[in-house]
Amino acid sequence: MTTNMAERSRTAETGSDIGSEDIIAGNVSKYTVLPAGYCGQPKKGHLTFDACFESGNLGRVDHITEFEYDLFIRPDTCNPRFRVWFNFTVENVKESQRVIFNVVNFSKTKSLYRDGMAPMVKSTSRPKWQRIPPKNVYYYRCPDHRKNYVMSFAFCFDREDDVYQFAYCYPYTYTRLQHYLDNLQRRNMDYFCRELLGLSVQKRQLDLLTITSPEDKTDLENSVMQKKIKIPKLSLNHVEEAGEVTDYGEEDVELRHSKRQDGRKQSEGTHKSIEAVVARLEKQNGISLSSTSSPEEAFMETSEGMNNMDDAVVPRVLYEELLRSYQQQQEEMRHIQQELERTRRQLVQQAKKLKEYGALVSEMKELRDLNRRLQDVLLLRLGSGPAIELEKVKPESIEPEPEVQKTFSEEANTSTYYPAPVPVMDKYILENGKVHLGSGIWVDEEKWHQLQVTQGDSKYTKNLAVMIWGTDVLKNRSVTGVATKKKKDAVPKPPLSPHKLSIVRECLYDRIAQETVDETEIAQRLSKVNKYICEKIMDINKSCKNEERRESAKYNLQ
């Protein structure tokens, strides 16, 4: 068998227009795959494949590596273009042996293997079918196999004495089907008929099954009651469409309908046809239900009237079921209405809270700007900074007040108000070529104008820090004053002035406010101020060390 399979492999490789799947003659039978150049008896781990059993399908196996095998499945009997089913066994395995099987000649372009389905596997010690984990299954188109679709799956053998069986899905054999049909035929059921329609190409029976009710419906009902066969629940839609009076036998015969085990609700047609059934009873039996105060009373009167009827339209048990179902639906509707009302009240409360929160945010922003302007005016009047005439300070402090009142009046009209950002240059005082940033901090006017055209928050913050502190101060300071944890013997440096850090944040806030009004984005960008200053301090220290190295190297050369 090994020689025959090798000859078939060589023939498939040398064929020009004929594919390897077109020349597969039959299933493999106890075929042991040996590595190339190996001579001798097969050892443990040299896998033995077999598909010579009912519903088996595996025509050829190629050994790629120690861990990988290419599998070719046989096509359908009458159409060689259809190649989907596979079912084969593997034995002579080694414990903890890992392999990859590639079924390389699938014909389907779309497969459930792409959506999480996995092949089935079982063994002699575990005869129950199980699925391989979907994470180990791959379905793709491979250019190495004439662009056929390939299904690859990885598997690990855990018991050497077991025979493993792999299949496309749960196998259902022809023999099992025939046994099942024979059992049904032996029961001599009136509504089941089996006939021979013909024979297949392989001389197998093609059965024609007819499942229907016999001509005499009364005999069918009596047989059902005698055998105690459960019948499905009746639908009122079918009763209305039939338009005929169904005879269910004597009055004392009660049909017991099977209840659903999964707890699902009744069908929609059953609930909607209650009123139609009541109207039909009024029309046919002369029972007036219009004077009743509720559908429940109507059902009770109808049930009492049915005891005196010779021919009932629907069974009494069905009426009782409909009544219970109607009551359940009413109860569920009340619960749903209560849940909706409770949810509506919660939504109204949350909307009010959001409206109040938006008003508070706008008010806090306005108060923050006003507080900053007042601090600057107080510092100037107390003499912190160059001498400035009070006439020049007074307009700066009074001018924003009408604007603040205007914003508060607008805020009273709407809860989603966002104040328009004030231009950056209008918020700072210019005097004698200097710009006052607040808290007695002055910077050069020309450098300030150059800073305003700087691109990016990082570069803006670093240049502003150099303008406020200078490189000589920054290189000997830290932002927090805490020693770094990267070095064990690191000595903490003095922290930067908190009020100057707040000025840096205020300036960056004014810059960001010109670009966006999103509070979340503003807070996120402001949180990186300390990081930018730390990076600038590290850059200054690094440049100082490089300068010291250059001076030392120059001194050594001299």
Image: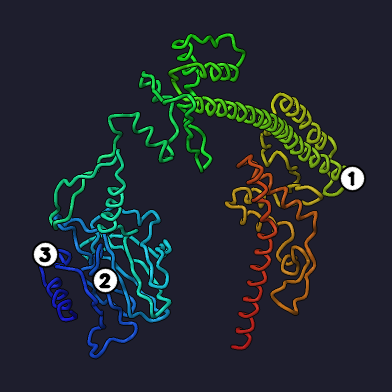
Q: Residue 251: give x, y in percent of width and height.
A: 47, 24
Earlier in the chain: of badge 2 and badge 3, it is: 3
Q: Residue 469: give x, y in percent of width and height.
A: 74, 60
Task: Name the one closer to the observer, 228 or 403.
Answer: 228
Earlier in the chain: of badge 1 and badge 2, it is: 2
Q: Is disc 2 surrounded by few (<14), some (14 to 19) or many (20+) residues within 10 Å? A: some
Q: Nearer the viewer, mark 1 or mark 2?
A: 2
Instruction: Indicate left or right for 124 with 414 as reference.
Output: left
Instruction: Indicate left or right for 368 with 173 as reference.
Output: right
At mark 2, the secondary structure is strand
Earlier in the chain: of badge 3 and badge 1, it is: 3
Instruction: Indicate left or right for 63 with 197 as reference.
Output: right
**Answer yes or no: do the residues labelled 1 and 2 have beta carbons within 8 Å?**
no
Residue at point 64%, 27% (across, down): 334
Task: Name the one closer to the observer, 422 or 304.
Answer: 304
Residue at the bottom extreme? 40
Q: Residue 216: give x, y in percent of width and height.
A: 30, 29
Report the Cα–Cα distance between label 1 and label 2: 90 Å
Residue where numbered disc 2 is placed = 70
Which kind of residue does numbered mark 2 sit on? Answer: Asp
Residue where numbered disc 1 is placed = 382
Residue where numbered disc 3 is placed = 18
At mark 3, the secondary structure is loop
